[in-house]
């Protein structure tokens, strides 16, 4: 509303020039209370455009501004900042109006809803899901919930990797090392074992037969370049001499890099080699790399045996990931895996050829894209289709089926090249009227700063990760409760609280970090009872809620009553304004596809509540309009916290 009012004033000031309205975006929440609630910083850029001193422009904007119903008289500060302070009565009325709105807290639905397809989680089944897939699941689910809550049409589609090389590995593994009895007892662990085994053998050969010899060649090349340069006569000209020395040091740098790379590869191979079983198996399966590709190709070509194995392996894999989703409380509208698009791939390639987009290069079919160093390969030399082809078929399907305005892919940052190429190709292909977004996120790191792994060295199994968080949460919750003069939680309650706190901690840590940066996975940090954590937020909620029980107040009755809100104390007013800013936090999440705007907001709200609670007695408030007014603020705070956490997929508890 403030932006709209400021926009009107700006256009009037610019004598009807509509483009001046863009500066209204510079109305932002103030950083400090002494600057009011909002600050409009448009006078500086507009002054520049009009060639007038910004303070003068600020005065002119204020003169044109019609906001007496919302704000006190604006103040101009510094070089031309316009400080806006909401009227207490306006804030109080808005809060009172939001109070009975149990679900939405007065947050209006967007005026023009858009349709979003969200592609998240999307693990490759039949190989262990890792912590990056949780991050995708958690961020994707939060964006889905927020978009839906603000009134957009949302469709989630879990693009499960159920058709890739990992099945070639398992099929090969099954044929050579499969254990029928083990599979009957526990299918997924057996498949995981096969996947790991075959993967190790493939890696072994790739290292020993390809990567290491290639690295050795590079070292030799670098060595000979260095000695060539060193043997060359030193130029007489000082400038040339300098250049020569620089060339030598560059070549030496490259040599050092090549040697380091060689040593790293060698160390990796030695590690694999140290297990004599691995070495023996690798020797017994010298062409396993190609064999795995052949098994995958046979599956894709409809080979009866491989198809039957795939049909046998897939259901337990899906059941396993469903268990994780249940535990995380995440559901999807659709889960159309890669295999769903199998029959569409040839058609996609045909069409790209027909439209002159895909061209043959070294026998492969490629889309060459301006500004991209590598082409987008849609069909390999041997006729195989790729991840790229499936993703194009998926776009075609989603556009036809759901006509979205936007498709969001929540996938880690390592795939950014793939998505850049995919989106560019799709636009050339004719899908130029839809917003494609790669909602990229950083890596979850361990204490050592490397991608997070368990002690055994394998990528962390998800259920183990969740179990440990819940276990640790149980210890914390129990210790806190035992420390009370009179513990209040039963064993069952403790378990429920621990589940919510533990899972909440993992989710919140994924969400509260700026998604594009890496972050260190730390149980201690994420389960801390203070700071920007789920546990602190859940505790804040429980603390606010407990007031109603203590005071014997029924919040539903209070909301329906004629009790009004007054905002006399600064802490009270600050809390009231923060509650109203919930919808702004949601808008920021949607605007940038960043859930951390919501965690930041909730953390700030909890802080404002704390200082309100310290400064403003609630149950002990002397006189009646005040007590009810403060209780209404407590109720709004509790519901905003609960709703916000709930949009992030985190459950609250009434007592903890
Ligand atoms: N299955 C892929 C992986 O685990 C992620 C898929 C993301 N979605 C997509 N449409 N490409 O890396």
Image (cartoon, rainbow, N blue to C red):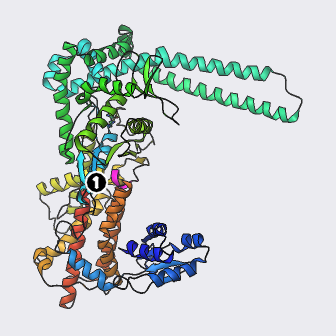
Asked whether, in this view, residue 309 is left or right of residue 424, the answer is: left
Asked whether, in this view, residue 46 is left or right of residue 409, the answer is: right
Q: Where is residue 476 shown, x and y percent of the image? A: 25, 56
Closer to the camera in the image, 613 or 647: 647
Instruction: Tell me if residue 247 is in the magenta stretch.
Output: no
Which residue in the rendered view is the most extreme toward the front? 16
Closer to the camera in the image, 294 or 203: 294
Instruction: Tell me if residue 513 is in the magenta stretch.
Output: yes
- Tell me the chief SS of the magenta region: helix
User: In this picture, is 305 found above or below 545?
Assistant: above
Residue drawn at x 25%, y 39% is: 400
Which residue in the rendered view is the most extreme toward the right? 236
Residues rendered magenta in the picture: 509-514
Q: Quadrant of residue 24?
A: bottom left
Residue drawn at x 19%, y 13% is: 305
Which residue in the rendered view is the most extreme toward the bottom? 623
Q: Which residue is mark 1?
A: 114
* Local secondary structure at mark 1: loop
User: In this picture, is 637 found above or below 163?
Assistant: below
């Amino acid at each position: 509303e403030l932006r709209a009012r400021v926009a009107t004033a700006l256009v009037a000031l610019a004598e009807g020039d509509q483009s001046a309205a863009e500066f209204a975006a510079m109305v932002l929440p103030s950083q400090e209370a002494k600057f009011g609630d909002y600050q409009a910083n448009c006078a500086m850029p507009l002054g520049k455009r009009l060639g007038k001193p910004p303070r003068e422009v600020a005065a002119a904007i204020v003169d044109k501004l019609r906001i007496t119903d919302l704000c006190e008289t604006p103040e101009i500060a510094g070089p031309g900042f316009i400080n806006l302070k909401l009227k207490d009565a306006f804030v109080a009325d808005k809060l009172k109006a939001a109070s009975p709105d149990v679900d939405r807290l007065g947050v209006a639905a967007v005026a023009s809803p858009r349709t979003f397809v969200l592609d998240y989680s999307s693990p490759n089944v039949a190989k262990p899901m890792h912590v990056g897939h949780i991050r995708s699941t958690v961020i994707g689910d939060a964006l889905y919930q927020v978009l839906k809550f603000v009134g957009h049409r949302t469709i989630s589609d879990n693009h499960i990797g159920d058709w890739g090389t990992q099945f070639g590995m398992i099929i090969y593994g099954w044929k050579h090392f499969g254990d029928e009895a083990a599979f009957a007892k526990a299918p997924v662990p057996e498949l995981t074992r096969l996947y790991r085994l075959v993967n190790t053998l493939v890696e072994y050969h790739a290292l020993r037969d390809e990567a290491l010899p290639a690295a050795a060649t590079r070292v030799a090349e670098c060595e000979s370049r260095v000695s060539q340069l060193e043997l060359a006569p030193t130029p007489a000209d000082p400038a040339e001499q300098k250049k020569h020395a620089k060339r030598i040091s560059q070549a030496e740098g490259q040599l050092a890099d090549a040697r380091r790379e060689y040593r790293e590869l060698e160390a990796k191979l030695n590690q694999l080699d140290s297990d004599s079983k691995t070495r023996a198996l690798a020797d017994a399966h010298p062409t396993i790399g190609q064999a795995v590709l052949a098994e995958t190709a046979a599956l894709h070509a409809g080979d009866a045996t491989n198809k039957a194995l795939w049909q046998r392996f897939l259901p337990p894999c899906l059941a396993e990931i469903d268990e994780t989703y249940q535990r995380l409380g995440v559901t999807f509208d659709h889960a159309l895996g890669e295999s769903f698009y199998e029959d569409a791939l040839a058609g996609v390639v045909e069409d790209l050829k027909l439209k002159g987009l895909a061209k043959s290069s070294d026998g492969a079919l490629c889309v060459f894209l301006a500004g991209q160093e590598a082409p987008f390969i849609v069909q390999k030399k041997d006729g195989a289709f790729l991840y790229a082809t499936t993703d194009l078929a998926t776009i075609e399907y989603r556009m036809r089926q759901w006509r979205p305005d936007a498709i969001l892919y929540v996938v880690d940052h390592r795939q950014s090249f793939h998505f850049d190429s995919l989106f560019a190709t799709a636009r050339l292909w004719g899908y130029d009227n839809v917003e494609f977004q790669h909602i990229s996120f950083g890596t979850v790191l361990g204490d050592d700063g490397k991608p997070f792994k368990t002690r055994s060295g394998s990528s962390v199994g998800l259920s183990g990760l969740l179990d440990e968080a819940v276990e640790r949460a149980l210890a914390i919750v129990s210790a806190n409760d035992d420390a009370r003069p009179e513990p209040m939680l039963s064993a069952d309650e403790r378990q429920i609280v621990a589940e919510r706190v533990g899972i909440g901690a993992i989710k919140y840590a994924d969400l509260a970090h700026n998604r594009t940066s890496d972050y260190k996975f730390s149980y201690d940090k994420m389960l801390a009872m203070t700071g920007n954590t789920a546990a602190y937020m859940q505790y804040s909620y429980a603390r606010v809620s407990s007031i109603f029980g203590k005071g014997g107040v029924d919040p539903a009755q209070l909301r329906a009553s004629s009790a009004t809100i007054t905002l006399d104390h600064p802490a009270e007013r600050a809390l009231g304004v923060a509650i109203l800013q919930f919808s702004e936090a949601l808008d920021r999440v949607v605007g940038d596809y960043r859930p951390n705007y919501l965690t930041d907001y909730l953390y700030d709200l909890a802080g404002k509540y704390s200082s309100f609670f310290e400064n403003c007695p609630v149950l002990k408030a002397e006189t009646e309009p005040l007590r009810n007014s403060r209780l209404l603020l407590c109720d709004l705070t509790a519901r905003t916290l609960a709703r916000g956490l709930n949009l992030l997929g985190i459950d609250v508890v009434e007592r903890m």
